[in-house]
Amino acid sequence: MHATTVAVDLAKTVFDLAIADRQWRITGRRRFSRQKFAHFLATVAPTHVVMEACGTAHYWGRCAQQHGHTVTLLPPAYVRPYVRRNKTDRTDAAALLEAVRSGEIPTVPVKRVEQQALVALHRVRAQWMRTRTARLNALRGLLREHGILLPAGPRAALRAVLVILDAADAPLPTHLRQVLASVHAEVRDLEARIADLEQQLRVLADADPVVTRLRTIPGIGLLTATALVGTVGHIHTFRRARQFASWLGLTPREHSSGPRRRLGGISKRGDVYLRCLLTHGARAVLVTAHRRRRTAQPLTRLHHWALQVHDRRGHNKATIAVANKLGRLVWAVWHYDVPCDLPAAS
């Protein structure tokens, strides 16, 4: 096979390949199952393999790299405009060739197994947290229908549920008590699982120097640091801090034409989970800044700037501005391999 580039349209069971020569002309097409595609990667001469950065792409990227192939992963949203007419596996594979030929699309680094495992831990934890919140809301709603109100906060609510279920004079039927006790036990079991998973994250964080440096940034804790390391394939892919903040979706959405420049709210592109964690971290920075100003403690430049934005633009806009700033600090700390040392406000 005389080919320089192989574009692969990934799927669960059937993979469609478009084989191109040096002039980017398609010289052949293949259609493989999973087993035959793995055999193809092992037997074909080292070449350039192009895939979308979608499900299983990082796994197949590592498989291709093990056999000496050069792997390029492209963001699916950037490949879609190159699809001609109807969407099929054949046109998707041809679109990959057109997209990589342009040379203008940023590539996605192939993640290591450890990075994908780290992301998996966060995904499982997020699902457990959603389930825990749903069960707590169910307890509140069911008890409210019987005239019983639970206090605010999950811990106080769970303690109150135990007292209510043990009380003989509570206006609850016996069969409902049993169901509520089962829901309460499920929430406690979820909390134990979440605590065990967070302990695993702490062990992984202690062994990773990048996570240790990222945690020196105000507002960046265990969850945010490990999620960043797991999700961001390679920080040197981003040339500057603003590009990283834009990838996170924390820069203004732009709709400009000619001499008129229109900037709106943040673009909300990129990973929603990372943006949510950085936003929570920004809220923590603002709370700390307000407490330090109220108690006359010394402020860092970050806290002083956050307070200025808060006083000028309000709480919500200040929160997003600080989240943007945290994203840029993450890029600087990670890119230059230095801990965060914020100077005091002058």
Image (spheres, grey):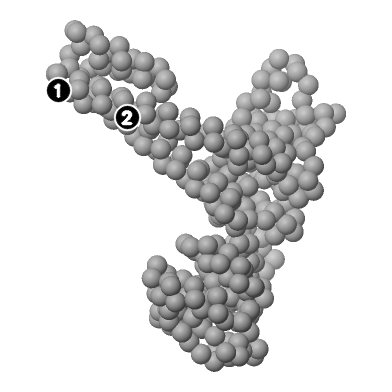
Quadrant in the rendering for residue 51: bottom right
Q: Is residue 72 visible?
A: no
Specify the quadrant that holds the C terminus: top right
25 relative to 217 in the view: left or right: left
* Residue 318 in picture, x, y percent from top left: 63, 37
The answer to whether 302 is drawn above or below residue 14 in the figure is above
Q: Nearer the viewer, residue 156 or 116?
A: 116
The answer to whether 244 is drawn above or below residue 127 in the figure is below
* Residue 126 in picture, x, y percent from top left: 45, 41
- The residue carrying mark 2 is 186
* Residue 169 in picture, x, y percent from top left: 19, 7
Q: Say which amino acid is labelled 1.
A: His
Q: Say which amino acid is labelled 2.
A: Glu
Identity of the residue drawn at 69% across and 26% down: 289
345 relative to 103 in the view: left or right: right
244 relative to 301 in the view: left or right: left
* Residue 14 in picture, x, y percent from top left: 40, 74
Q: Is residue 293 visible?
A: yes
The answer to whether 313 is drawn above or below residue 103 in the figure is above
Q: Nearer the viewer, residue 37 or 54?
A: 37
Looking at marks 2 and 1 on the same chain, the residue that comes earlier in the sequence is marked by: 1
- Secondary structure of the residue carrying tag 2 is helix
- Secondary structure of the residue carrying tag 1 is helix
**Which numbered disc covers residue 175?**
1
